[in-house]
Every structure is written in C-alpha cells, then in structure tokens.
Amino acid sequence: MLKGKVVSLRLVKEGDVDQLWEKHVDIADRGPFFPIGVMSQPGFRKEFNETGFWEAEKGMLVIVDKDHKIIGHIEFFKTVTYLDELELSYQIYGTQNRGKGVATDAVSLMTRYLFERLRHNRIRLIIHPDNAASRRVAEKVGYQFEGISRGIWYNRGKHHDVAVYAVLQKEFLER
C-alpha cells in the first residue's frame, strides 16, 4: 500500500471487483473529460482473475480514503513500444470526493512509485484542455505542460484536442 497525506493506493482485492465494475460502467459519474468506453462484466472479471489488474507494463490501484473506502482508481500503462514513457489515468468517483486533493495525492504517489520501481524516464498525462482541475493536478505534482495535440482524441462523438503534460524521472525525484 502506498500512503499519502490524503489517500492511500492499494492493489485491487477480490471483494472490490463488483464495486469497481459498477463504477466502471457508471458513465454519468465520469464527467465530460473521462473516456466513455466500457468493458463487459465477464471481460472485466477475466482481466482481474488473470492479472489482478497488475502487470509489468500496466496496472491499476484503487484510491482509498482514511476510512479505507474506495473513492477512485489510478492506472498506468506503456504508451507505445518505441518511447521510454508511461501514461497515467485516474478517476475520482463522486463529486463529493473531488476538489479535496485526492487526485493530486494519488498522482504524486503513483508517479513516485513508478519512478522508484521501473526504469522509464518519463511519465505523461493526457488532459482535455478545458479540464482545469486536472491541469492543476499536473502542475502541483511537477508535470510540465508540453503542448497541445490537435484532434487526437475521439470521445463522445467528436474529436478533441488534448494537453500533454510530462515529468522526467530526474526532475521528479530531485524535487
């Protein structure tokens, strides 16, 4: 378990799977900036049974509050094979858990863990330009704005630009 100031991150347990799948298919709770794709319940459970949602180049941890209640999840994955980078994605469940430093703490914890554990030199965040909250999270954790990728993300029936934020291992670990 990774413990932060506001939340902790832990591996998914068998007893979490049904609750996580319910959150996974609750598109209305995602807000306008999180992808709306879903996985079938058998596929979701199969992935958990085969990997526990944790592998060498991708994984998911649940975000839990001080009462050990699941309030979100954070994922990492390799972007493309020829780049030495990982990408993070996160979702905070329920509006009552947003705006309290949960995402900032989770991104900081996961970034530190990945840089201390794996040899990747870079971690990036892909953020919709209108998502001011996620842009603030990136900046608070030490990610630098690198630019806008135009029309690269298809979601909710149209193509969107995305803001690219990234941090290098040395920059993050020496702060």
Image (cartoon, rainbow, N blue to C red):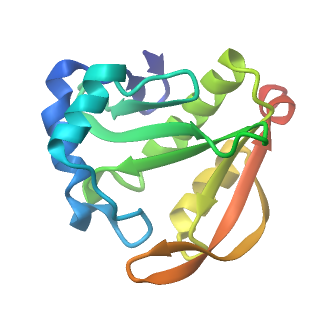
Instruction: From the viewer's perspective, tell me whether residue 124 is left or right of residue 157.
Output: right
Instruction: From the viewer's perspective, tell me whether residue 115 is left or right of residue 160.
Output: right
Q: Position of residue 140 (x, y in %)?
A: 66, 49
Task: Report the quarter where the N terminus lies.
Answer: top left
Instruction: From the viewer's perspective, tell me whether residue 138 is left or right of residue 33.
Output: right
Up the image or down, 9 lies above or below 37; here it is above
Q: Nearer the viewer, residue 161 or 45?
A: 45
* Quarter-of-image position of residue 51: top left
Q: Position of residue 55 (x, y in %)?
A: 49, 22
Q: Position of residue 66 (x, y in %)?
A: 31, 27
Work out whether residue 101 can be spotted: no
Q: Position of residue 6 (x, y in %)?
A: 43, 33
Q: Which residue is rendered at x = 59% and y = 63% of the image?
A: 127
Q: Nearer the viewer, residue 10 or 152?
A: 152
Up the image or down, 60 lies above or below 82; here it is above
Q: Which residue is rendered at x = 69% and y = 20% of the image?
A: 118
Q: Which residue is rendered at x = 32% and y = 62% of the image?
A: 30
